[in-house]
Amino acid sequence: MGEFTTNKEKVLQALSTVEEPDLKKDLVTLGMIQDVEVGVNQVSFTVVLTTPACPLKELIRRNCEAAIHEHLSPDVEVKIKLTANVTTTRHTGPLIPGVKNVIAISSGKGGVGKSTVTANLAMALHRSGAKVGIIDADISGPSIPLMFGAEDMQPTITPKDGKNYINPIRQYGIKMISIGFLTPPDSAVVWRGPMASQALRQFFADTDWGDLDYLLIDLPPGTSDIHLTLVQTVPVTGAVIVTTPQKVALADAIKGMSMFKQPQISVPILGVVENMAWFTPEELPDHQYFIFGQGGGQQLADKFEVPLLGQIPLVQGIREAGDEGRPAVMNTNPIVNDAFRDAAESLAQQVAIRNASRERTKPVEIQV
Ligand SMILES: Nc1ncnc2c1ncn2[C@@H]1O[C@H](COP(=O)(O)OP(=O)(O)OP(=O)(O)O)[C@@H](O)[C@H]1O
């Protein structure tokens, strides 16, 4: 076997035959190939993915390797480094300059596990290597502080350029701010619409978020002023709808999703997460009991022509972890971890697809 040498151009030519499966363009055109180095019997390069939570990363790696072997030489050693630079919904404006994507997590009705899903999606995205923040805008029951064991924490204020900035709480690697941090835990303060809307605006404009790939907003269930304030304040990358499979939940979820589609709101729906999809007892991990019915999440996704991002089982450990102040993915139950990791990867994938293909959302101007 003779020595094989090549040049960077030929490597790029070979890699221009590899398509990014979601974005349907080749990796070179998309600017995803960097740091090409060629040596004797060896090439190395970096693939810059659109998200560290990319579910297709191993497929892309294999396809790159195969393209080099096919177009250059079957004997060359291929060294591939995978990194990610999360794409952004541009025009995030001066309000939150370092935040690449704002994702609204919503539900048609209360109690379907929206906050639980938000907390665990955030942790799963963080574990993939992304920079993640949460705004808990659920005035009906701000549960994020509790779920992160942060209910006694108080955000601090730092003056900067003549303005006071709120420093988000940082817990388990996630930056977070909650309407719950602004009221004593057991107080009976009722957040009225305008006050809550004002607080939400502050969470964007007056909070020092730094650089974030994904800022998840835990919205109140149903439809409210908060939803309107959100879309009027920042461009939202998209919304995720959390539902349980039973009929009553689905009927409310349809209302919730229709709200996002109204022209004056016009937020793209990234997909559906079906929570409590089935019950799995800890001691019988292979068993699935469809106690709330079956297939509801998929039906809802089909109706709105959006993907079903994930199905989360009803597992006692998820509830216990929430009560203990550590999102369940921090424990080692593979059923729980796999379900949330898959959902987080699908979400990140949809964000990347949207950022590559759709019109950017602009804050909505409401004529009164
Ligand atoms: N997949 C699950 N398995 C077990 N328990 C769950 C699951 N999802 C949520 N729960 C539990 O159900 C309860 C309600 O969940 P959560 O507070 O997340 O709902 P929510 O939709 O955010 O409610 P709200 O309407 O108050 O905002 C919590 O006790 C939570 O721990």
Image: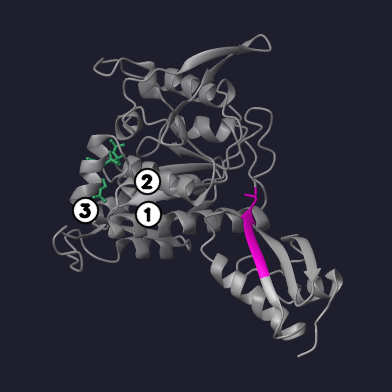
Q: Could one spot residue 19 in this view of the protein? A: no
Residue at 28% from the left image edge and 19% from the top image edge:
185
Kindly report the distance in space between the C-alpha atoms of the residues bearing marks 2 and 1.
7 Å
Spatial CA distance of label 3 from label 2 is 14 Å
**What residue lies at 66% left-to-right and 47% top-to-bottom?**
360
Q: Tag 1's secondary structure?
A: helix
Q: Quadrant of ligand 1?
A: top left
Name above or below for residue 339 compared with residue 113.
below
Q: Quadrant of the N terminus?
A: bottom right
Give, as a single range, the part of the protein colored magenta.
79-87
Contact, CB < 8 Å: mark 2 with mark 1? Answer: yes
Q: Secondary structure at mark 2?
A: helix
Which amino acid does the dot numbered 1 rest on? Answer: Phe
Residue of label 1: 340
Distance between mark 1 and mark 3 Cα atoms: 12 Å
Amino acid carrying label 3: it is Val
For residue 279, side relative to residue 331 (left or right)? left
In magenta stretch: residue 9: no
Q: Position of residue 19 (x, y in %)?
A: 68, 72
Residue positioned most to the bottom: 1
Q: Amino acid at mark 2?
A: Asn
Residue 270, position as x, y percentages in the image: 50, 54
Q: Which residue is mark 2?
A: 120
Dividing the picture into quadrants, the one containing residue 140 is: top left
The reply to whether discs 1 and 3 touch (Cβ–Cβ < 8 Å) is no
Q: Main secondary structure of the magenta part?
A: strand
Find disc 3 in the rendering and name its residue. 315
Of residues 143 and 153, the one drawn nearer to the viewer in this rendering? 153
> Under tag 3, what secondary structure?
loop
Q: Is residue 334 left or right of residue 320?
A: right
- The number of discs equals 3
* Residue 171 horizontal/vertical position (percent): 41, 32
